[in-house]
């Protein structure tokens, strides 16, 4: 086990904390898809005699096949881990907190947010902050609000036409 975690460069939490307590080293690893794996390796040099325990460790803790495990141990080959399926969108990006505020508080749709620049997003957010919600509590997500102020940047972003 120790050779496998060394080949894949798992972090030894005990070494990082300056500890050597108990009878195991604790290792953590973050996969390319963001999963956080944890395992323990005995301070001793003994083998795992229980085949079911070994299968459990491979499947649940290391998330590797037996072939990947032995390739790492015998030849130093890092296991191939799946990468996230999500594609990085092309175009401008917006600060995550600002995007959340535009979606949740302002009422902007994800489609309305797509392709918006950071500068434009800031303008929309500042416009919303300066006008806030209307007295009826409907907020700027109501197309009737835009009929009264069609010059607002929010109207053009939230609604294709103020008469919707």
Image (tube, rainbow, N blue to C red):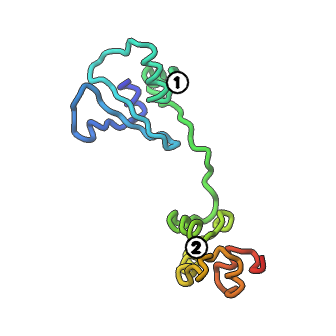
**Residue 10 spot, x, y in % from top left:** 38, 35
Residue tagged 1? 65
| Above or below, comparing residue 81 to residue 100 in the picture | above
**Residue 87 spot, x, y in % from top left:** 62, 50
Estimate how packed mark 2 is, as few (under 14), some (14 to 19) or many (20 or more) residues with alpha carbons within 10 Å: many
**Residue 143 spot, x, y in % from top left:** 71, 77
Question: Between residues 123 and 164, which one lies in front from this camera angle?
Answer: 164
Q: Is residue 115 visible?
A: no
| Above or below, comparing residue 144 to residue 32 in the picture | below
Residue tagged 2? 121
| Above or below, comparing residue 113 to residue 55 in the picture | below
**Residue 84 spot, x, y in % from top left:** 57, 44
Q: Is residue 148 left or right of residue 47?
A: right
Question: Between residues 16 and 157, which one lies in front from this camera angle?
Answer: 157
Disc 2, SS? helix
Q: Quadrant of the N terminus?
A: top left
Disc 1, SS? loop
């Amino acid at each position: 086990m120790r050779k496998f975690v060394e080949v894949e460069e798992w972090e030894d939490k005990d070494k990082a904390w300056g500890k050597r307590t108990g009878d195991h080293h604790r290792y953590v690893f973050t996969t390319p898809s963001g999963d956080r794996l944890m395992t323990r390796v005995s301070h001793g040099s003994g083998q795992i005699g229980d085949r079911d325990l070994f299968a459990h460790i491979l499947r649940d803790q290391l998330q590797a096949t037996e072939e990947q495990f032995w390739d790492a141990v015998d030849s130093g080959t890092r296991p191939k881990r799946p990468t996230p399926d999500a594609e990085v969108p092309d175009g401008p990006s917006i600060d995550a907190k600002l995007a959340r505020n535009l979606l949740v508080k302002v009422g902007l749709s994800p489609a309305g947010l797509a392709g918006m620049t950071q500068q434009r997003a800031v303008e929309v957010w500042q416009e919303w902050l300066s006008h806030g919600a209307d007295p009826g509590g409907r907020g700027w997500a109501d197309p009737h609000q835009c009929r009264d102020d069609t010059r607002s940047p929010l109207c053009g972003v939230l609604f294709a036409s103020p008469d919707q």
